[in-house]
Image (tube, rainbow, N blue to C red):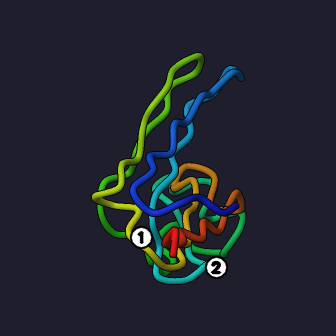
Amino acid sequence: MKIDAGSSLRLLKRGGETHTLTQVTQFGGGGIVPPLNQILFGTPTPPTFFFGPPNFVPAGGTSTIGPDILTPGIHLLICIIHPWMHETIVVENDD
């Protein structure tokens, strides 16, 4: 997904489960749910690569990630509840 610098990303969760959109330094790490980590990685405590606020989006709710976090560049984000769910956000200057 690409957005312009200075923009915010509004998250709308229409389904029945809570998710997050949380920045990571790389894809492929675990999340915050030990039983899912055990199934996915064979350990309840695999390496994790997330940082910053988790941006929880409750079922039927919304959350916003602002330009203070989405600075120009490439941002990798995962759901730290369901770490197989991920997205790459490219923030571009208007130049």
User: Which residue is disc 2 drawn over?
Assistant: 28
For the residue marked with disc 1, what is the amino acid?
A: Phe
Circles 1 and 2, Cβ within 8 Å, touching? The answer is: no
Instruction: Please tell me which residue is depicted at 51% across the width and 76% down the height of the picture.
Output: 95
**Quadrant of the rendered image containing residue 36:** bottom right
Circle 1 sits on which residue? Answer: 50
Residue 29 falls in image quadrant? bottom right
- State the quadrant of the N terminus: bottom right
Tell me the SS state at disc 1: loop
Residue 85 horizontal side relative to residue 7, left or right? right
Q: How many marks?
A: 2
Q: Is residue 23 left or right of residue 40?
A: left
How far apart in space, not on screen, are marks 1 and 2 (Cα)?
A: 11 Å
Q: Earlier in the sequence, mark 1 or mark 2?
A: 2
Q: Residue at x 33, y 61 (%)?
A: 69
Q: Nearer the viewer, residue 80 or 5?
A: 5
Query: In x, y percent, where is residue 5?
Result: 45, 63
Q: Nearer the viewer, residue 37 or 91?
A: 91
How many C-alpha atoms fall within 10 Å of the one at disc 2: few (<14), some, or many (≥20)? some
Q: Is residue 17 left or right of residue 5?
A: right
